């Protein structure tokens, strides 16, 4: 399977998982916006598949003399993108909705591009400038929509979600770059994705334990089993796996651009399945379309 196809499957899985997350948030109002069960389920699913993969083929998971760097960057990617990126994204989705939250994090390819230019010496193309401009227009449309809302409380709540959402592409853009470094040597994608997700899960457990909330969250989710969040965990596991499969065969800038197409996928899915939960105004749809066009320009060279 080509890297571009794997990236497209990953983008669809990410969009679907966030749609399920939004539905789960509306049903049970989870304390941490649903991050705990999604990380737990996705980590469990990937670990199980890794064990099955090892039983079927006990070949080395990483090939190369300096494999420690690959493992380290897969772990760092999990902490930065999978944990911190989702903490910001899920909080934003809870406040401003799935489509608007995903539209903002479509800026992640810009962060990846900045890292490629600043640290890897890659040259910026004029289509990248056009793409960044279109992404900025899309974000401005969301800000204008928030400003036009009548309720002061709604505007404050919406803007706070927008500010949180802006953190998500920063974390995810950096994490995407780490994922690419993690696959510089031949590495099994299921092993890389399991390292990524388990690093996020155990770091989150450590943070919750230090704050005295681990047992509280565990009891809450056991007593309030939410099938939408559980299903989102399964789909998220697939999304992470296919992302690593994609960057193993294609440049991370290309993969991150394809992942950035989520706004259009999610807008379509939300319009079909979340008509009551997602208030899709014409400005939201226009913003998603402009952002997707910007993502296309960034990848067009």
Image (cartoon, rainbow, N blue to C red):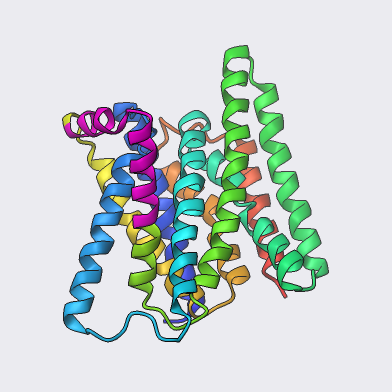
Would residue 151 be visible to someone looking at this image? no
Q: Main secondary structure of the magenta part?
A: helix
Left or right of residue 203, residue 98 in this image: right
Give yes or no for residue 123 being in the magenta stretch. no
Task: Out of 115 and 272, give the one closest to the viewer.
Answer: 115
Residue furthest right in the image: 126
Task: Out of 170 and 234, give the one closest to the viewer.
Answer: 170
Locate the C terminus by quadrant: bottom right
In percent of the image, x 23 and y 68: which residue is there?
Answer: 49
Task: Out of 118 and 21, give the one closest to the viewer.
Answer: 118
Locate the N terminus by quadrant: bottom left
Residue extent of the magenta highlight: 198-222
Q: How many tags in the picture?
A: 0
Q: Is residue 49 above or below residue 88?
A: below
In percent of the image, x 68 and y 51: which residue is there?
Answer: 290
Q: Is residue 227 above or below residue 292?
A: above
Q: Quadrant of residue 145?
A: top right
Residue furthest top in the image: 152
Q: Report x, y in % for residue 30.
A: 33, 29
In percent of the image, x 72 and y 60: which residue is there?
Answer: 114
């Amino acid at each position: 399977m080509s890297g571009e196809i794997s990236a497209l499957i990953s983008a669809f899985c990410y969009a679907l998982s966030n749609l399920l997350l939004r539905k789960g948030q509306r049903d049970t109002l989870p304390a941490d916006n649903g991050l705990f069960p999604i990380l737990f389920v996705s980590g469990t699913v990937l670990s199980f598949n890794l064990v099955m993969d090892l039983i079927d083929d006990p070949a080395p998971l990483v090939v190369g003399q300096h494999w420690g760097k690959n493992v380290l960057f897969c772990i760092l990617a999990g902490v930065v993108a999978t944990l911190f990126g989702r903490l910001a994204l899920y909080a934003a989705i809870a406040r401003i909705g799935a489509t608007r939250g995903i539209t903002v994090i479509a800026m992640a390819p810009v962060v990846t591009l900045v890292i490629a230019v600043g640290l890897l010496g890659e040259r910026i193309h004029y289509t990248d400038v056009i793409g960044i401009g279109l992404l900025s227009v899309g974000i401005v449309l969301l800000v204008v929509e928030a400003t036009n809302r009548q309720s002061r409380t709604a505007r404050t709540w919406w803007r706070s979600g927008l500010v949180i959402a802006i953190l998500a592409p920063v974390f995810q853009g950096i994490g995407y770059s780490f994922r690419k470094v993690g696959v510089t040597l031949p590495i099994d994608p299921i092993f890389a994705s399991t390292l990524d997700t388990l690093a996020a899960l155990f770091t989150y457990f450590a943070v919750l334990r230090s704050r005295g909330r681990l047992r509280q969250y565990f009891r809450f989710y056991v007593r309030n089993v939410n099938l939408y969040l559980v299903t989102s965990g399964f789909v998220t596991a697939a999304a992470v796996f296919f992302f690593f499969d994609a960057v193993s065969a294609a440049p991370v800038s290309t993969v991150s651009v394809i992942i950035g197409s989520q706004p259009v996928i999610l807008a379509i899915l939300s319009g079909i399945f979340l008509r009551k939960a997602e208030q899709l105004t014409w400005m939201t749809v226009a913003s998603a379309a402009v952002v997707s066009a910007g993502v296309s320009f960034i990848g067009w060279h």
